[in-house]
Image (cartoon, helix red, strand yellow):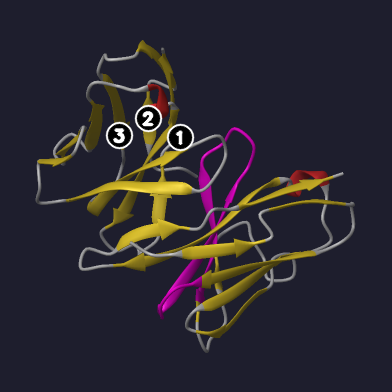
């Protein structure tokens, strides 16, 4: 079963706006990773945040992690049409033998 | 990052047949992971393949249905055996890399079973 839940399941915004996606998980983790998937293709690795980090940036991406609430968020600023994709979080459990557990995903649509 | 290739990229197969998916990585890795993504769903781990030992399967997946080979540190295959339409999915291989063990994925193999 999937450990993570993401919300919203789907999000549509205008180009140029910011998009925020949330991920919740259930067990203690080593790290949490965010991925993008375009139209059922392979997953593109976006960012990894470790359990002792609270915030991380990469270009237009900002990821936060709150281990007390077992949740993470992904913010995409100044969205572009090319950001249209599904976004997944994946957790690396503290004693999980490097097995990732994926969230349910958020389908993001950027309206030009 | 990691450069991972998969073959075939897609296939349409008949019920009852088998398909072998190949995964090639650009450098040596200890573990390779095989995932399945059913239509409209998230990813589920099928098994972990270590070179020189039997693959470790997750609950709900068995070796007879999904035999895996790992002949060396850069290559693995996953076979989907005796296929049924329920096996229609994207199959992805994956490896870990880097100081913080980021996990990277291949482009996936889109399988349709008729």
Name the element at disc 3: strand
Give SS at disc 2. Answer: strand
Mark 1–mark 2 Cα distance, whole angstroms, equals 6 Å
**B60 and A61: which is toward the camera:** A61
Question: Does the CB distance between marks 3 and 2 fall below 8 Å?
Answer: yes
Task: Please give the label number shown on residue A24.
Answer: 3
Q: Main secondary structure of the magenta part?
A: strand
What is the x, y in percent for residue B7? 65, 63
- Residue in the image at 40% along x and 38% along y: A88
- Identify the mark at residue B97; answer none if there is no mark: none
Residue B47 lies in the magenta-colored region: yes
Provide the residue span drawn in magenta. Answer: B25-49
Mark 2 nearby-residue class (10 Å; few <14, some 14–19, many ≥20): many
Where residue A72 sits: x, y (%)? 23, 35
User: Which residue is tagged 1?
Assistant: A104
Mark positioned earlier in the residue sequence (3 or 2): 2
A90 vs B26: above or below: above
């Amino acid at each position: 079963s999937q450990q993570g839940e993401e919300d919203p399941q789907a999000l549509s915004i205008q180009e140029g706006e910011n998009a925020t996606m949330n991920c919740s998980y259930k067990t203690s983790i080593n790290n949490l990773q965010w991925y993008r998937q375009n139209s059922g293709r392979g997953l593109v690795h976006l960012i990894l945040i470790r359990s002792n980090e609270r915030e991380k940036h990469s270009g237009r991406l900002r990821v936060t992690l709150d281990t007390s609430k077992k949740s993470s968020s992904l913010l995409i600023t100044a969205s572009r049409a090319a950001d249209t994709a599904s976004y997944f979080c994946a957790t690396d459990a503290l004693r999980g033998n490097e097995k990732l557990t994926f969230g349910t995903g958020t389908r993001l649509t950027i309206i030009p | 990052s990691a450069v991972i290739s998969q073959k075939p990229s897609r296939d349409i197969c008949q019920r009852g047949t088998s398909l072998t998916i190949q995964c090639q990585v650009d450098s040596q890795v200890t573990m390779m992971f095989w995932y399945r993504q059913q239509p409209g769903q998230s990813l589920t781990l099928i098994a972990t393949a270590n070179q020189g030992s039997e693959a470790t399967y997750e609950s709900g997946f068995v070796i007879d249905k999904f035999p895996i080979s790992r002949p060396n540190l850069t290559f693995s295959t996953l076979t989907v055996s005796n296929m049924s339409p329920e096996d229609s999915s994207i199959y992805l291989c994956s490896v870990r890399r880097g100081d913080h063990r980021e996990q990277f994925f291949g482009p996936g193999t889109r399988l349709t079973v008729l």
